[in-house]
Image (tube, rainbow, N blue to C red):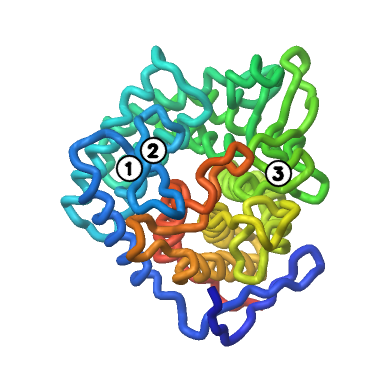
């Protein structure tokens, strides 16, 4: 896992200097996108004619564990295919992207069940499909999915309910997980593309309430915020997938960085921009030397704890966008450098699955407290990795400004 580096890029985070290690040679994004294309084709060769989606591979496995459309991760595989098509312009990849996206259409039906994960399921798939094709059929499904997601909004609380099952199982009257900051992107988008304007209001209210209560004073996040359904008051912050209620679960923090960066893009509310900076800075400040976080920043056995490459991929994609939205030149450069350092580390043999298995990344952690997908390849890690690579290729590196 060692690698020689030639120089350091220093950035100031909260008054403290933090280095982003940079390799001697510049980052070759086309090389990495060609790698992801090879891995996509390896996976397709094994899947056959099915609507089952590849989800994960444990460290000792070389074949994907597959799930049906109802799994919360079902939208990531079609999304990966659309990103691969965007790079390759390969018609065979486009056909597969269309086929797997179509497998999810019934999820937008208001008569079927669903929860907050509709954003992951439908916007990662149909959102990218519409972005790259302009097919109006895709737009209609996104808007239907947004309307369905909005039904989980509780106006007394001001957020979308995440896990209806937890109301009885855990005694959480209204629970909102940090992951939900990702799903409100579909509401923002739908409200601006023919959907009901109330979808924007719901997304905005959710982001504001989450910003107010789902983070500690230092900028670290709770996985779950529990609210009273009668008066909307915040009851407590707890965890379901982190080490403890008081700790910073790495993927949850990355969801927050991505979600508030996106919220600033959609609203131009500078309070979201400043908050995205704050929660990014604590994430970056606490990274280990190779920039890939442990699954929880406060796990007690660090450095003998599993890493989470998926959290690094999510953060890399978010930080690239944050760098393009920044209103201060020094911050544009800082977040670009941070994102690049994350991508560079993810693109080494230490974290790429390579020839061993048909995934992009290894060393991801799904749910350690529940004992599954530990030190694994996971489809959402791969999705945000290829999204980050695509953004790196499309975005313009910030110029050196004083």
Residue at image position (44%, 58%) is 361
**Eye-nearest disc, 3 or 1:** 3
Tell me if mark 1 has few (under 14), some (14-19) or many (20+) residues whose alpha carbon lies within 10 angstroms of its own: many
Marks 3 and 1 sit apart, C-alpha to C-alpha, by: 31 Å
> Which badge, 3 or 1, comes first in the chain's sequence?
1
Q: Regarding mark 3 in the picture, which secondary structure is present there?
A: loop
Number of marks present in the image shown: 3
Q: Which residue is mark 3?
A: 243
Q: Compared to 395, does 56 lie above or below?
A: above
Q: Regarding mark 2 in the picture, which secondary structure is present there?
A: loop
**Eye-nearest disc, 2 or 3:** 3
Q: Compared to 213, does 265 lie above or below?
A: below
Say if mark 1 contacts mark 2, CB within 8 Å.
yes
Q: Which residue is mark 2?
A: 75
Residue at image position (56%, 78%) is 22
Tell me if mark 2 has few (under 14), some (14-19) or many (20+) residues whose alpha carbon lies within 10 angstroms of its own: many
- Percent position of residue 308, x then y: 57, 54
Marks 2 and 3 sit apart, C-alpha to C-alpha, by: 27 Å
- The image quadrant that residue 327 belongs to is bottom right
Marks 1 and 2 sit apart, C-alpha to C-alpha, by: 6 Å
- The image quadrant that residue 103 belongs to is top left
Residue at image position (67%, 51%) is 296
103 sits to left or right of 203: left
Q: Regarding mark 1 in the picture, which secondary structure is present there?
A: helix
- Percent position of residue 175, x then y: 67, 25
Residue at image position (57%, 87%) is 6
- Percent position of residue 298, x then y: 74, 52
Q: Which residue is mark 1?
A: 78
């Amino acid at each position: 896992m060692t690698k020689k580096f030639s120089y350091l890029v220093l950035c100031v985070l909260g008054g403290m200097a933090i280095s982003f290690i940079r390799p001697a040679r510049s980052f070759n994004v086309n090389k990495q996108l060609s790698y992801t294309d090879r891995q996509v084709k390896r996976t397709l060769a094994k899947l056959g004619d099915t609507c089952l989606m590849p989800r994960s591979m444990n460290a000792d496995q070389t074949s994907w564990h597959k799930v049906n459309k109802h799994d919360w991760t079902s939208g990531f595989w079609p999304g990966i295919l659309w990103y691969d098509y965007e790079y390759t312009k390969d018609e065979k990849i486009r056909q597969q992207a269309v086929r797997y996206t179509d497998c999810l259409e019934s999820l937008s039906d208001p008569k079927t069940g669903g929860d907050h994960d509709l954003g992951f399921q439908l916007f990662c798939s149909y959102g990218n499909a519409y972005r790259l094709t302009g097919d109006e059929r895709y737009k209609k499904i996104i808007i239907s999915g947004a309307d369905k997601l909005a039904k989980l909004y509780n106006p007394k609380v001001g957020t979308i309910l995440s896990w209806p099952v937890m109301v009885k199982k855990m005694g959480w009257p209204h629970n909102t997980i940090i992951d939900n900051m990702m799903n409100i992107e579909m509401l923002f988008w739908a409200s601006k593309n023919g959907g009901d304007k109330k979808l924007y209001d719901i997304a905005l209210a959710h982001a504001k309430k989450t910003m107010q209560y789902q983070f500690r004073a230092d900028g670290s996040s709770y996985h779950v915020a529990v609210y009273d359904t009668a008066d909307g008051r915040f009851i407590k912050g707890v965890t379901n997938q982190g080490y403890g209620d008081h700790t910073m679960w790495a993927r949850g923090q990355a969801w927050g960085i991505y979600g508030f960066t996106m919220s600033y893009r959609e609203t131009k509310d500078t309070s979201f921009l400043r908050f995205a900076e704050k929660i990014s800075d604590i994430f970056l400040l606490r990274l280990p030397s190779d920039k890939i976080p442990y699954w929880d920043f406060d796990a007690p056995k660090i450095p003998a704890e599993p890493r989470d490459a998926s959290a690094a991929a999510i953060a890399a994609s978010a930080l690239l966008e944050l760098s393009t939205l920044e209103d201060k030149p020094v911050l544009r450069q800082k977040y670009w450098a941070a994102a690049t350092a994350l991508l560079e580390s993810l693109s080494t043999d230490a974290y790429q699955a390579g020839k061993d298995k048909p995934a992009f990344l290894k060393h991801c952690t799904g749910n350690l407290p529940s004992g599954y997908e530990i030190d694994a390849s996971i489809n959402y890690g791969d999705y945000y990795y290829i999204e980050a690579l695509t953004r790196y290729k499309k975005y313009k590196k910030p110029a050196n400004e004083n």
